[in-house]
Image (tube, rainbow, N blue to C red):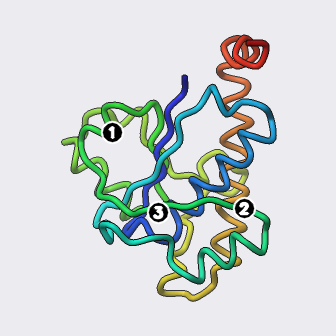
Amino acid sequence: MISVCFVCLGNICRSPMAELVFKKMVKEKGLENSFRVTSCGTEAEEGCSVYHNAKLTLERHNVEGNHIARQLTKSDIINNDYILVMDSANLSDVLRLCSGALGEKVYKLTAFTSRPRDVSDPWYTRDFEKAYSDIYEGCERFLDYLILEHSAALNYDKRH
């Protein structure tokens, strides 16, 4: 099983959007039993659900699901295969939390795209569609990467 944790600041906009988008993509490929997908925030709004405008954006794109915000811990970093952050500040926060160790499993979500960049925070920009677009592209390219990297295991999982 491949474990993935998406990380942003508050865990109410970008990272839960990425979690739910990625879960949908994985399910559409018949790989949901091969993945454990979560999300956290470096300064999470503990116990809050997905921010209303983020939820509306997901619904417009037929992405369903619920999420309750929680704080990222060192244990999350240790126990996930991939930690995908939304921006440079999140990257610094995650690396600081694990004292620079385990950095080989921490990536910006858009690092897998042809145009690596930060996913701007729609909490401040109010542009939830732009965030969704960047997240969707990042998730799509990341899944392509995983399918190539783990093809034998994922093909086995698909058959069983």
* 7 lies left or right of 74: right
Q: Which quadrant would residue 160 be assigned to in this image?
A: top right
Give the foreground label among 3 and 1: 1
> Local crowd at mark 2 within 10 Å, few (<14), some, or many (≥20)?
some
**Residue under pointer 1:** 77
Q: Which mark is residue 63?
A: 2
Q: Are marks 3 and 2 in contact (CB under 8 Å)?
A: no
Instruction: State which tag comes first along the sequence, 2 or 1.
Output: 2
* Secondary structure found at label 1: helix
Instruction: State which tag comes first along the sequence, 3 or 1.
Output: 1
Q: Which mark is residue 8?
A: none
**Residue under pointer 3:** 87
> Local crowd at mark 3 within 10 Å, few (<14), some, or many (≥20)?
many
Q: Quadrant of the N terminus?
A: top right
Q: Which quadrant would residue 147 be assigned to in this image?
A: top right
Instruction: State which tag comes first along the sequence, 3 or 2.
Output: 2
> Local crowd at mark 1 within 10 Å, few (<14), some, or many (≥20)?
many
